[in-house]
Structure formats: structure tokens, C-alpha cells
Image (cartoon, rainbow, N blue to C red):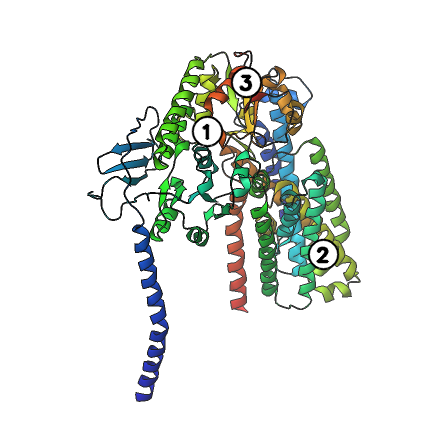
């Protein structure tokens, strides 16, 4: 690892820590920092609402860190897999697949399945769409065409979601609309444990993919020449991406742009090609952007939905990437 | 060149041939609209002239030649105005584009189920042929009284073809669909804006029954009912007690929207002697608050009033299960959560006609009335 990379990753890490603390200490209810620290260390509070408020701030900060980090890593894996800087859970229809799974449970009269049902269907939806994109990728050479196919699959699944939406009852549609706005808020202790547990497991699994990803970034043939089991590598990449994207989509709604924008920003800050460095850097970058977005949402009394904030940051990065790609093509 | 010219000429001739049927269609379409306007006719002058006491959103203007029914925005809302004329004489000076009510109304379409409540009371429900959001009234007792009811909306957007095929004599719409209104009007549909929900008191809202009474020529029934409910309501009104604070609603996503202090439900609760926690929020819109703020409010307010759709057997424990923080709310600890289940009660439909019953419900829940069978609001146990 170069010295510059070391400085950059430590700076982003410190930034995440500072934003995490800021998210704990600011809010529409003013609580003395000593009272917050007292509550965090298991102390009691003079106001019965404060323990819940502090716990809520802590939970949403953790969800933002792990959710944002997971989306960024999922985006990175997809960009390596498709060798396309515009690939991401949102663009390739994976988030839409997860949305369809969630919609089937919430809007399709399967609410009896509960949150477990939502998770299972969300993961199945994401996995199915990614599998379909992969299948079609065998017949398509152009990366741009594949992205367009991904977008079309996204529209296709969205059409099903729209149909379910029109047929569903008022309370179900309300629930789905709220979910669709995206939020890092609202996870209780049990859900948070599951959320962090699944993401941590998926992220730890990427350790076994580092060598493969380094090879894969240079092409499938190159990876093969390095002695990498390409089939196993592909399976792992699909599985981990689906799980990461689906878990975040299920719990936080379809959070857009973080998955595509963060790997781009990481490449801007570091020239490293080693995924042993890029993966944790992406995680921290995603966490940074997500928690910053959450603070922005909270500063606007929650009147700006999370997806609006992430779009404000993410969309310019993507436009910049497209312009950069275009310039490269012209130069070639 | 000549060849090219003759080719172009041929092309234009062919295009023109295609255009002729289109022009004919347009002309025919204009003729149809003209005929629609001619359906209006003269009606006997009503001897029953209604006075408006509380409502600000409509008025009547009685002349020898016609009765003008005017609906309009209330101060602070986006401006709108709409009028409908009931003719009593052919000798009138009304402009040609005025909306004139036909002698007999055979079919009505409504954009809101609230309109149905007024029509139901006046026994005019059999004339309703179309409604926006039929699925939302499936559980309402009113639904059984409606025969051959058509859905006229997709989501919230009106389906022009459906409305045109039903060709109602009158279509009650909300004013926020003003663009839709002018489009439908151009297509020959007689629309009329109803904005009873903008009134600032439940009795003012109820007074809209007089408007429906005039339009259906049942002025006396409407007036008698209004006077009866008004009397019953004001007999029981209490002064707000500043020690009995209440707040409203449940969170919507990350936010908690509290109604304006001028809203109908706040006025109702204040008339039952409760005092609103957000009395200073006097705008026309709901105010978003963070959950944090509302959790703090919850630990302080004596009463929590919830109007929501929940299972029939919904209990206080079920509410706490929705969020653990609720168990530390003062109203929950003191068993003072007043609940209206919109899934099992007809709050959004018949509730408009029964503010006196709702007031009694609240008084009973706050122990100011000893005997009463709650219809809309009850204490959550």
C-alpha cells in the first residue's frame, strides 16, 4: 500500500467516525452531550424519551455505515465483474428485483410472511435479476448494451410493482411508498443485529475473492491464466452482490447512486488496483456518503427523502464518469 | 422537377384524404358537446331558501330566474371558484357557458367517498354511477347500497373514457384537480367543485349538506338534519382545559405529520375540552415533525388521539408492539389513547355527517359523559 493510499483511507475512516459522532449528538431534540454519553454507557436519563432517541440515533448511524458500505462494495464487485464503471445494483436492475420481491410480500397480500418473508423474497428478487443479466451477458459483447438490458429489466420489474401497487389496498400502498423513499431509520435491535450480521458475513467472504477480483479486473482470460477458478469466482461474486444489495434494499428501501458513485470516487482518490485495499476503501467511502446523506436528511426535519439526497450527490459523479468514458473512447 | 412536383402533389392529396375523416370526427365531436349543453332546463322556484351559518366554502344566491350555487376556496387555500345554476325561468341573463343543472339528475359521479355520505343521507345514492377509489369503500356499509358502481380513476387520475361513457349529469370533484376539471368540462361533463374538507369546523363541514340538498331539491331534509345536529353538538361543547393536552396521529416513514390547529379534527377535540399540544401551528397544511420530537411530546401529553386503519381487535399492546417507545408515553401509561379505527368505523364517510356522535365519543373517552355507546372513537385498552 502506498503512503498516499494509507493517508486517504485513514482520513476517510476518521471522517466516518466524526460523522458517526455528529449523527449521535445532533438532532431536533436537544440533549446534553454528557447525557448522551451517560446513556451510551448504560446510565439513566431524566427524560423517558431520551434513551429511545439516543438508541434511535445510534441504530440509524450504524445502519447508514453498514448499508452505505455494503452498497458501495456491491457496486465495486459489479463494476469489476462487468468491467464497466457504470454497473451498480440500481442500474443493472438488481435493486428493482429486490423491490419486486418486497412488493410481492407487502402489496401482493403476503404480509403474513412478515419481515422474514420480505428478506427471503427480496434476496430472491435480486438474485433472479442478476442471474438473468448474467445469462443475457453471454450473448452480448457490448458493455453499454448490457447496461441498457439491465435498465430494461429494471423497468420490467417496476411494471409488475406498479401493477401490484394499483391493485393493493390503501395501507399496503402507504407502507410501500414509505419503504420506496429509502431510509436508514427504524431498525430495532433484532433487525439491526441481523442486518449487520449478514453484511459482515458477506463482506468477510470478499476476502476469498481478492485475488480473483484482481485477476478478473484484467479480464476473464487473464484471471484463468492466473489459475483462478473462474466459475467459482463468478458464483461468489453473484452471490455476495445479491445478498449485499438485497439486504440493504429490503431494510432501507432502494437506496440509489451510492453503489455506482462511491467506486468512482474511490478510483479518483487512489490509483491502487489491489482489491485488498479497494474493497475496505469502498466500504468506508460508502459509509461516509451514506451517513453524510442521513445527517442531511435529519437536518431537513426528515422532509428530504434519503433517495433525493443520495441522488444529489451521486448523479453528478455518474455524469462525470460517462463524460470521462466518452473522452476515453474519442481518444481511442 | 415535374416528376417530383407531381409526386409531392400525390402525397399531399393522400394526406388530405386522411385528414378529411379526422376533421369530420372533430366536427362531430363539437356537435355532441353542443347537444350536451342543451339538456339543462327550467325548474320550479324553491320556496325553501337556505341560510349559511358556518361554512365559508360555498354560498347560495337566490333570484327570481335562478339559484346560483357557488363553491370557492377559503382564505389561505389556492384560489378556486365554481358555480352551478338552477334555472327557474327561461328569461335569464346568464352567459352561454354557465353550468346549468338539468331538471332531473339521473346519474352522478364522485371523486370522493365523502360525497357519498351526503347523497346517502338524502336518499340519492341510487344515482351514483361512478366513484374514484371504489376499493376504499368496500368495507363501508354504504358500499352495499351502491349498485353497478364504476371505478372512474386509475390511481388518482380520472379516466376520461370511463367518465365519458358514464356521461353523468353531475360530477363532484375536488378543486385540486382543476386541470382535469377544465378538460372534462370541454368534453361536455358537468363538473362541480366540492371542498367541504377545507372548512375549519366539523359543523361548518356538515353544513355542506345544505349544498347537496339544494342540488338534489331536498333543501328541507338537509336543513332539518343540520339544525338537529348543530343543536346536539353545541349543547355538549366544553371549554378547552389547558391541563389536558393531546397530540395526534402516527408516524409516516421517518416523519410525524401533525394537523394544523385549524383542522377539523383539532376543533372537534378542543370542543370536547382537550387542549392541542401544537396550538401555535395554525397554517393550512400538516406540519412535519421528527420522530424524536414526537417521542418527547408523547412522554408529556395526556391524550394521544389516533385515526388509523388497523385490525378490528387492535389493542394497546398491539400499539406498543409497533414501537417500544410508546410504552413510555404518558397517554399509554395512563390508558388515555383515544383511537378511531378507520377500517372498522366509517369515520371518513358517515363521520362527516355525525360530528355530534364523534363529540360524544370523545367526551365519553375523557370521562365527561357517563353513558354512551362509542361509534367512531374509543379508549384503547
- The chain carrying label 1 is B
Measuring from the top left, give residue A19's x and y in whole percent: 58, 35
Badge 3 local density, few (<14 within 10 Å), some, or many (20+)?
many
Question: How crowded is the residue under tag 2: few (<14 C-alpha within 10 Å), some, or many (20+)?
Answer: many
Give the Cα separation between the discs numbered 3 and 1.
23 Å
Is residue A210 at all visible to an observer of this figure? Answer: no
Numbered disc total: 3
Disc 2 marks which residue? A213
Q: Looking at the rendering, in which quadrant would you find the C terminus of chain B?
A: top right
Residue highlighted by disc 1: B352
**Residue B380 in which image quadrant:** top right
Mark 3 lies on residue: B303
Q: Quadrant of residue A51 in the image?
A: top right
Q: Which of the pair B86/A134 is nearer the observer?
A: B86
Which of the pair B158/B279 is nearer the observer? Answer: B158
Q: CA distance from mark 3 to mark 2?
A: 59 Å
Under tag 1, what secondary structure? helix
Amino acid at each position: 500500500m502506498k503512503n498516499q493510499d494509507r493517508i486517504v483511507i485513514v482520513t476517510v475512516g476518521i471522517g466516518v467516525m466524526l460523522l458517526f459522532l455528529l449523527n449521535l449528538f445532533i438532532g431536533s431534540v436537544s440533549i446534553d452531550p454528557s447525557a448522551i454519553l451517560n446513556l451510551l454507557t448504560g446510565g439513566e436519563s431524566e427524560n423517558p424519551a431520551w434513551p429511545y432517541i439516543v438508541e434511535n440515533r445510534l441504530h440509524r448511524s450504524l445502519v447508514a455505515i453498514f448499508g452505505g458500505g455494503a452498497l458501495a462494495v456491491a457496486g465495486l464487485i459489479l463494476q469489476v465483474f462487468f468491467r464497466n464503471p457504470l454497473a451498480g445494483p440500481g442500474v443493472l436492475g438488481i435493486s428493482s428485483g429486490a423491490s419486486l420481491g418486497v412488493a410481492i410480500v407487502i402489496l401482493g397480500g403476503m404480509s403474513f410472511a412478515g419481515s422474514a418473508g420480505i428478506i427471503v423474497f427480496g434476496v430472491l428478487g435480486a438474485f433472479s435479476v442478476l442471474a438473468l443479466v448474467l445469462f443475457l451477458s453471454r450473448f452480448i459483447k457490448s458493455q453499454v448494451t448490457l447496461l441498457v438490458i439491465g435498465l430494461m429489466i429494471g423497468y420490467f420489474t417496476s411494471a409488475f410493482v406498479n401493477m401490484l401497487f394499483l391493485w393493493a389496498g390503501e395501507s399496503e400502498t402507504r407502507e410501500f411508498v414509505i419503504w420506496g423513499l429509502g431510509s436508514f431509520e427504524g431498525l430495532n435491535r433484532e433487525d439491526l443485529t441481523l442486518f449487520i450480521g449478514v453484511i459482515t458475513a458477506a463482506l468477510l467472504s470478499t476476502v476469498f475473492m481478492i485475488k480473483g477480483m484482481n485477476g478478473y479486473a484484467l479480464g476473464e482470460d487473464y484471471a484463468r491464466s492466473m489459475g483462478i477458478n473462474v466459475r467459482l469466482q463468478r458464483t461468489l461474486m453473484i452471490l455476495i452482490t445479491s445478498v449485499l444489495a438485497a439486504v440493504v434494499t429490503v431494510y432501507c428501501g432502494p437506496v440509489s447512486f451510492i453503489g455506482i458513485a462511491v467506486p468512482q470516487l474511490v478510483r479518483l482518490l487512489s490509483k491502487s488496483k489491489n482489491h485488498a485495499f479497494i474493497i475496505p476503501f469502498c466500504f468506508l467511502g460508502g459509509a461516509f456518503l451514506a451517513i453524510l446523506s442521513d445527517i442531511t436528511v435529519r437536518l431537513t426535519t426528515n422532509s428530504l427523502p434519503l433517495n433525493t439526497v443520495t441522488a444529489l450527490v451521486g448523479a453528478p459523479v455518474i455524469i462525470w464518469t460517462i463524460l470521462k468514458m466518452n473522452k476515453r473512447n474519442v481518444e481511442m | 422537377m415535374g416528376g417530383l412536383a407531381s409526386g409531392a402533389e400525390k402525397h399531399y392529396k393522400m394526406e388530405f384524404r386522411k385528414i378529411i375523416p379526422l376533421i369530420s370526427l372533430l366536427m362531430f365531436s363539437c356537435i355532441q358537446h353542443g347537444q350536451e349543453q342543451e339538456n339543462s332546463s327550467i325548474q320550479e322556484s324553491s320556496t325553501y331558501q337556505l341560510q349559511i351559518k358556518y361554512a365559508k366554502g360555498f354560498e347560495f344566491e337566490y333570484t327570481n330566474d335562478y339559484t346560483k350555487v357557488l363553491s370557492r376556496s377559503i382564505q389561505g387555500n389556492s384560489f378556486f371558484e365554481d358555480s352551478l345554476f338552477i334555472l327557474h325561468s327561461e328569461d335569464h341573463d346568464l352567459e352561454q357557458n354557465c353550468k346549468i343543472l338539468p331538471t332531473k339528475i339521473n346519474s352522478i359521479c364522485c371523486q370522493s367517498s365523502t360525497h357519498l355520505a351526503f347523497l346517502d343521507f338524502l336518499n340519492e345514492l341510487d344515482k351514483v354511477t361512478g366513484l374514484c377509489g371504489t376499493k376504499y369503500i368496500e368495507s363501508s356499509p354504504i358500499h352495499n347500497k351502491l349498485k353497478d358502481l364504476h371505478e372512474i380513476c386509475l390511481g388518482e387520475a380520472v379516466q376520461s373514457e370511463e367518465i365519458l361513457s358514464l356521461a353523468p349529469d353531475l360530477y363532484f370533484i375536488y378543486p385540486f384537480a382543476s386541470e382535469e376539471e377544465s378538460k372534462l368540462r370541454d368534453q361536455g361533463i358537468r363538473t362541480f367543485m366540492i371542498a367541504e374538507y377545507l372548512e375549519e369546523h366539523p359543523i361548518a363541514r356538515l353544513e355542506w349538506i345544505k349544498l347537496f340538498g339544494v342540488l338534489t331539491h331536498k333543501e328541507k331534509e338537509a336543513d332539518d338534519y343540520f339544525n338537529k345536529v348543530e343543536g346536539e353538538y353545541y349543547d355538549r361543547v366544553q371549554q378547552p382545559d389547558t391541563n389536558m393536552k393531546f397530540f395526534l396521529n402516527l408516524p409516516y416513514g421517518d416523519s410525524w405529520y401533525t394537523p394544523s390547529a385549524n383542522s377539523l379534527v383539532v376543533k372537534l377535540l378542543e370542543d370536547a375540552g382537550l387542549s392541542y399540544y401544537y396550538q401555535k401551528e395554525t397554517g393550512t397544511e400538516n406540519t412535519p415533525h421528527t420522530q424524536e420530537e414526537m417521542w418527547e411530546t408523547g412522554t408529556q401529553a395526556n391524550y394521544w388521539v389516533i385515526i388509523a386503519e388497523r385490525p378490528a381487535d387492535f389493542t394497546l399492546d398491539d400499539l406498543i408492539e409497533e414501537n417500544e417507545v410508546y410504552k413510555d408515553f404518558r397517554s399509554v401509561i395512563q390508558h388515555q389513547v383515544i383511537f378511531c379505527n378507520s377500517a372498522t368505523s366509517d369515520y371518513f364517510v358517515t363521520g362527516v355527517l355525525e360530528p355530534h356522535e364523534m363529540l360524544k365519543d370523545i367526551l365519553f373517552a375523557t370521562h365527561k359523559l357517563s353513558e354512551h355507546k362509542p361509534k367512531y372513537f374509543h379508549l384503547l385498552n
